[in-house]
Image (spheres, rainbow, N blue to C red):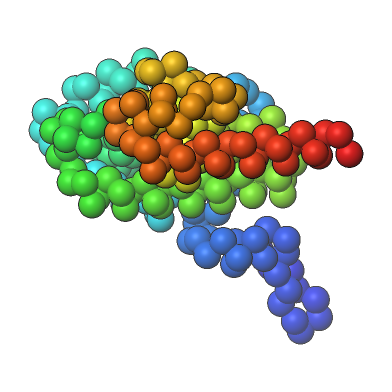
Amino acid sequence: MINQRGERLVATPFGERISMLYIDPVSAVVLRDGLKKAAGGIPTELSFLHLICHTPDMELLYLRRRDYEDLELFAIDHAGEFLTPIPDDPDLYEYFLAEVKTAQMLQNWLEEFHEDDIHERFGVGAGDIRRSVSVAEWLLYSGYEFAKLFKVRSVLPLLSDLRRRVRYGVKEELLELVSLRGIGRVRGRSLFKAGYRKLADIKRASEQELARVPYVGIEIARSIKRQVEQGLETETLTASA
């Protein structure tokens, strides 16, 4: 993170990036080492969700007595996906299981589980979910920045999509829809179920048709139509130029 030049200490590019991202230096090392391991394999979304839960910046969920067996079976089934070693020490192994539980909670969030269902399964309130999601998004962004710095380009698309999915709490298929202002996980899913799966589908629809979709209404319909038309016009002009 720093180099010594004579009597001066100078930040390396890695150190400068850590300072700009404002994360714990230990978190930065965890992300860097995980990225280097990911470069030699085929990481999954669980790989990175667990990796960010292995950092000191992420607050872990508490383990309940009934959690242990399911978490241990899950860890065995997904052992090849973790970017950090599974510890042998009993105390460290308990922390590892807490990391896995927290990663599972984030995974449920981006798979569009309702907050009430997440609360029932993990014993965590809506405010705690949102706080974890906010930290997770920033750590995934930090991971993306470090991947660029260390030229681990193969993971950039996964990290970019995963960060956006965590932000909105959606499956990958909704990413295009939730890019619109006023469209979150509930309205996005409602539009998708109604057959509006791409921005081009919204462009072809009338405001009245969109307004009939549950949770949308005329004001949101008018807003997203305007956004889509302006966005597509910009893309067309850019392509023509």
Residue 239 image point, x, y percent: 82, 34
| Residue 39 placement, left or right of 166 | right
The residue positioned farthest toward the bottom in the image shown: 7
Which quarter of the figure has residue 210?
top left
Note whether 235 is above or below 172 in the view shown: below
Image point 59% across, 67% down: which residue?
19
Quick one: which residue is furthest to the right in this view? Answer: 241
Image spot of residue 29 (x, y percent): 56, 51
- Left or right: 177, with 236 as reference point: left
Q: Nearer the viewer, residue 174 or 187?
A: 187
Image quadrant occupied by the C terminus? top right
Q: Quadrant of residue 116?
A: top left
Residue 208, quarter of the rendered image:
top left
Q: In this view of the protein, which residue sits in the foreground, 238 or 79?
A: 238
Q: Residue at x 70, y 69 (%)?
A: 11
* Image: 204 above or below 22: above
* Coordinates of residue 178 in the picture (x, y in percent): 47, 36
> Left of 204 or right of it: where is 168?
left
Q: Answer yes or no: is residue 98 visible.
A: yes
In the picture, the quarter occupied by the N terminus is: bottom right
Q: Position of residue 21 (x, y in %)?
A: 56, 61
Identify which residue is drawn at 56% across, 23% down.
204
Q: Nearer the viewer, residue 169 or 139?
A: 169
* Residue at (67% x, 65% y) in the render: 16
**Would you say 241 lies left or right of 93 here?**
right
Residue 39's place in the image compared with 77, above or below, is below
Between 155 and 163, the residue placed more toward the observer is: 163
Residue 162 visible in the shown view: no
